[in-house]
Image (cartoon, coloured by chain):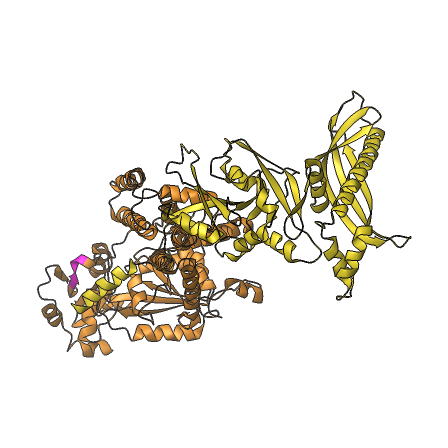
Chain colours: A orange, B yellow
Amino acid sequence: MPAQQIVEEVSVQWIKEQLDHFADLEERMLTAPSGKAGLLYIKSITDPQIINRSIIAPFYEIDNTQVYSDYLSSYPGSEEGKTGQHALELMLGGYACVHIEGKLCFFDALKAETRSVSENMTESVTQGPSDALTENLAVNLNLIRRRYQSTELKMESMLIGNISRTKVAILYDDSRVNHQVLDELRERLGTLRIDILQASGELEKYIRSDKLRIFPKTIVTERPDRVVFNLAEGKIAVMLDTTGYAILLPVIFNDFFVAMDDKIQLPFVGRFLKLLRITGVAMTLWLPALYVAFTSYNPEIVRVQIALLIAGSRATVPYPSFVEVLIMLVMMEFLTEASLRLPRAIGPTATTVGGLILGQAATAAGLVGNIMIILVSVVAISNFMIPLNMMSFSIRVLKYLFIIAAAALGLVGVVVCLVGFTMYLCSQRSFGQPYFKMFFLDSLGNSGKQKGGGR
Amino acid sequence: MRRLLLGIGLLLLCLTTGCEYKDIDRRIFVVAIGIDPGEKAGNFKVSLKLAIPQGDVTKIDEKMQILTEESSSISEALRRMKSKVEKELDYVHCKSLIVGEKLAAEDIRHVLDWAVRRRDIQLILNFAVGRPEALQVIEVKPPSERIPSNSLIMAMSGQGTESPFIASVYAYQLMRDIYENGKNPILPVIEAQGKEQFLINKIALLDKQKIRLVLSANETRLFNLLTRSNLRTNFPATVDDGKYQYYTESSSSSYRIITTKEGEPAIRYKIKIKGILEESSTQEIVTHSLLRQISDAGAEALNQEVGALLYKVRDSGLDPFGWGIHYGARHWNNSTEMRDWERLYPRLKFQVEADVGVKYSGMIR
């Protein structure tokens, strides 16, 4: 057995030296009539129950140390430390080291402190499953495997991060995935050299191809059903231990506007909801810019009644229209950002102060027009109609670009900006796949069962 | 440090605006223009109706301002008026241009040319003749109005009232009618009745230049019946002693230029009306046969009235219906067709075939 040769280099003593100043290092000697065994583990990340039941109790029940040693090494999850480095990794990964008859055996006793599967927070739906991915990779895999019972669902695993040693799982449907994309992902993950990896978004940032970009190229989701849905479309899911989110790639622009209840709703309702969402994006993106263009460059486009109304509401406003828009929008951003970070109990205060007092008082004082308040609230509300947060943030930032264009060139500026925006989207690639691929072109080609994704 | 300065500079640059930037509260909207002949011969008296926006929408009260300036040209008058207000005059929302009757009796082409040439005045500007003066029409301020000049805009564009007596004429239509062979322009006539009311129920027929004939209200309605479809109005019918009025639910008219058996040119008008009985002077029960009688009587009355109108128009030598262009479009001899038409025109005969169907008695009894 190879284990016996290793004992020479990896000894309990050596491990103990390496783990010097570990206050939570626990060493125990087990003595029974049949023999002796040494037990070494880091208390804080091991489960005392496992240690008790699977290591200590059998030792006293089994008379023969040889049989006990066999029992340990055949137990699922136990490993033999091949090199000193490996042994240390195992120890830090929650393994208990059992030293018996000069042989080292590492026994998996990891205690993963996680919360149980809970309701999802960021992508809630009205009907449909509401369980969210957790911080535990094993639980997440359970959630997905249960939904995707196919032999084609492959999983690859690797460790990333020199210190954090984060377990990364790559999931894909072998029959549907685009292997080019898969190879590219493997290569990018393989060449990654970082110390700490803690969040899915972080990983997304590291595996991106372009440094400067506005739109997210991967979906970060916490919904297992979205992961499964996208796996079936031929996408790849990357999941991290210790984070409750999965990364999906490659994605197209349209994927960000799919909510999981679209599938649940009746066809017409689903379409309507999607239309609503796209209108919402258009509104939040262009409404402030169009307001600037209409009030300061092209008042002839709106009807005379509205023009007079806007002129009336702006009569007391002391600064140009786009400064008014910028001030109100920034104020709104403060409000959203603040209510996001505030503790639950103070949250409503922020809304009251912001919404009621700020909005009401600003118009009453004549600092902003009445119509501006309506506009800002429409922008704020419609921005949250985008089901995926990442895209919602991108759109939030982008609208300022349109406002500046409108302030510089009026309606022409908005149109130029729109054309540029479309061209930019068309030039984008997500892992080599066209980003702005039109969704309806796919469903025209095949019957729509396998749309999107790589093929 | 240099980077920081560059960043601040860029940020400040973002706060600058483009060239044509002018906020809506720095503009004052001209909603109607009135042009009258000036006191000196050849001068124009230009009046502008300015809409003053209201800050508080809840207690809205129409506020307007009227500027008047006399000058030898319209542009000059407008430039001078700029000095009378503190904000920039903006013509983009000008929806009506009223030409004084005296000016329209001389020449409207100058005014039209100006209105079409100016790029900030929209071509969907409504043209009308103001009686007795354009200024008086502009000054009318109906109590129902909440936005200055809104009533004029609503009435003339047909967005509001669907009066059968109003014909709306846009600047581009007037332009076409004036420069097109075989058609003569028309203009609605707006009469100011005091300070609070106006009346639009007449049409002025123009030759290529000035007013030649003004139709009465009744004739105007018939004119609209012939030029528009689905005119909402009522027409009378008399059966024995009973006087009836029927409402036109749908109407359509078409004409053909034909040559009669005697070789004379004629125009055959076909008018189709579907109606509902609206008023009856008798206590008789309306039966199906009575409805048919009413329809026939109505058609007969319509035939005569429309015939009279058509002959009146022909005798004036004008062609507001565009028969000439219709004729030209259907006769394939470009060099002579319009001359032929001018020869034929005075000899035109009219055949009017009205088909009135009053379908419903208006009530169930």
Nearest the camera: A409 or A330? A409
Q: Is residue A93 left or right of residue A305?
A: left
> Percent x, y for residue A41?
17, 62
Q: Is residue B310 above or below residue A452?
A: above
Q: Quadrant of the N terminus of chain A?
A: bottom left
Q: Residue furthest top?
A: B283
Q: Is residue B84 above or below residue A64?
A: above
Nearest the camera: B170 or A188? B170
* Magenta-tinted stretch: A40-44
Q: Residue furthest front?
A: B40
Mainly helix, strand or loop, the magenta region? strand
> Would residue A294 be counted in the magenta stretch?
no
User: Which residue does the image show at 65% across and 42% down from the upper left?
Assistant: B203
Q: Is residue B91 above or below residue A192?
A: above
> Percent x, y for residue A170?
36, 67
Q: Is residue A187 left or right of residue A302?
A: left
> Percent x, y for residue A303?
48, 46
Q: Residue furthest right?
A: B262
- Which of the 4 quarters of the picture holds residue B201? top right
